[in-house]
């Protein structure tokens, strides 16, 4: 989690409004949060949760999916399924983190 403390709640709201531009796909959004996939990220997919409370914005990187293992298919070679091994938080664990953060702050 990254915590950003502003001089006032209005400064935090102004900064929070600008975070919408960061996303290529916003999956969920409310008056004090948004969750989705960041735009402009090379070789990966990054899901972030942005939460505003008072004069503070909290940003949580929920999961990162590497795209380095994506294979190219060449016409003269047989296709072999790549061994993609990556780790991500389960949806339940991600929700527990969000719930804990919202209860705490």
Image: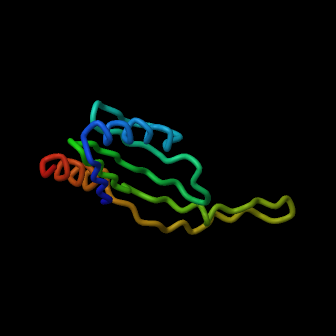
Which residue appears at 36% of the width and 35% of the height? Answer: 28
Quarter of the rendering containing residue 73 = bottom right
Which residue appears at 39% of the width and 61% of the height? Answer: 88
Q: Position of residue 58 (x, y in %)?
A: 29, 51
Q: Toward the viewer: 32 or 77?
A: 32
Q: Position of residue 96 (x, y in %)?
A: 20, 52
Quarter of the rendering containing residue 79 = bottom right
In the displayed structure, 70 sits above or below 14; it is below
Quarter holding the N terminus?
bottom left
Question: Relative to 43, is 3 on the left or the right?
Answer: left
Q: Position of residue 57 (x, y in %)?
A: 30, 48
Q: Position of residue 95 (x, y in %)?
A: 25, 49
How was this image coloured? rainbow
In the displayed structure, 43 sits above or below 38; it is below
What residue occupies the far right of the structure in this picture?
Answer: 76
Which residue appears at 32% of the width and 37% of the height? Answer: 13
Q: Toward the viewer: 40 or 94?
A: 40
What residue occupies the far top of the structure in this picture?
Answer: 31
Which residue appears at 74% of the width and 61% of the height? Answer: 72
């Amino acid at each position: 989690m990254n915590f950003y403390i502003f001089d006032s709640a209005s400064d935090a709201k102004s900064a929070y409004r600008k975070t919408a531009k960061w996303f290529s796909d916003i999956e969920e959004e409310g008056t004090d949060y948004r969750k989705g996939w960041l735009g402009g990220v090379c070789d990966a997919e990054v899901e972030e949760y942005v939460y505003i409370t008072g004069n503070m914005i909290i940003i949580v990187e929920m999961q990162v999916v590497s795209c380095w293992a994506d294979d190219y298919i060449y016409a003269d070679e047989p296709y072999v399924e790549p061994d993609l091994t990556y780790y991500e938080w389960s949806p339940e664990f991600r929700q527990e983190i969000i719930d804990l953060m919202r209860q705490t702050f």
